[in-house]
Image (cartoon, helix red, strand yellow):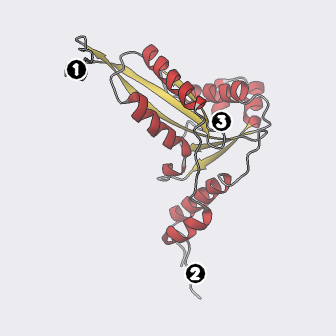
Amino acid sequence: MIPPKENAEFVAAMEDVLALYQLPYDPKRPLVCMDETNKQMVKETRSPIPMTPGQVARYDYEYERNGVSNIFMFTEPLVGDRTVMVTARRTKVDWVKAVRNLIDNEYPEADTVILVADNLNTHSKGAFYEAFDPIEARRLAKKVEIHYTPKHGSWLNIAEIELSVLSRQCLARRIGTEAELKEEVSAWETERNDSIVGVDWQFTTGDARVKLKSLYPRFER
């Protein structure tokens, strides 16, 4: 008996990503995971009362919405490094510009950047050709190797862990403007990179074949 097609596709994509996480560190082929989220800008309508001895800071319940900003997270789990970019939008053009920054500024000596990403229509090599001329688009496309997490399998993306930490440590409060968001995110990025916080990923293909065996084919003898 063969499982539904979507199960087989999930398994194939999952095992592909899990195999990447078992690769040894190679500076010429760095493994980078990327994910994205957004942050609602919220401005105070009244000045908060600052914290005093024995009294927490107090904020008025009223606020003013001030737009939404996008956040791209790129993290190299074996090194404990991350690059975070704040943009006004999350279009294909925004994504490829963020990837070009990764290739040219973060990993200029790498032969290829192995990129783990969610399978969204904005995350494709075709997007390079929508943003740049063919020569530049081809240059960038040759420098990146994209591997997609399966649908409903975003938990396989280590960048999602970093976004969760960013949300708890930095974003879980009112931030009024995109400029303020960029400043706060940059400070968080610097502090976390200086601490060299890596990820020790333990879930392997062998674990998947045991714990998620219901997703795998079952053949009748």
Q: Give the image location of residue 109, x and y in percent.
A: 79, 30
SS class of the residue under badge 2?
A: loop
**Image point (54%, 27%), residue name:** 191
The residues bearing labels 2 and 3 have C-alpha atoms spaced at a distance of: 38 Å
Q: Residue at x 50, y 35 (%)?
A: 36
Q: Is residue 69 above or below residue 34?
A: above
Tag nearer the camera, 3 or 1: 1
Residue at horizontal 33 percent and vertical 22 percent from the top = 174
Q: Which mark is residue 219?
A: 2
Quadrant showing the C terminus: bottom right
Tell me the kind of residue under disc 3: Gly
Residues 58 and 100: in front is 58
Residue 24 at x, y percent in the picture: 73, 50
- Give the residue number, with chain letter if any, for mark 3: 126
Please tell me how crowded label 2 is: few (under 14), some (14-19), or many (20+) other residues with Cα within 10 Å: few
Q: Which mark is residue 58?
A: 1
Q: What is the three-letter code of the residue carrying label 1?
A: Arg
Residue, far bottom: 221
Helix or strand or loop: what does disc 3 sit on? helix
Taking the spot 61% from the left edge, 27% from the top edge, the residue there is 98
In the rendered image, which quarter is residue 139 located in? top right
Q: Disc 1 versus disc 2: distance between alpha carbons?
A: 62 Å
Kindly tell me whether residue 119 is visible in this rendering.
Answer: no
The quadrant in which residue 62 appears is top left
Q: Quadrant of residue 19?
A: bottom right
- Tag 2 or tag 1, which sits nearer the N-term? 1
Q: What is the distance, in whole Å, between disc 3 and disc 1 at their CAs?
A: 49 Å
**Left or right of 199, for residue 144:** right
* Image x and y of residue 116, in percent: 61, 44
Q: Residues within 10 Å of mark 1 (few under 14, many from 20)?
A: few
**Residue 96 rendering spot, x and y as whole percentages:** 62, 29
Residue type beneath disc 2: Phe
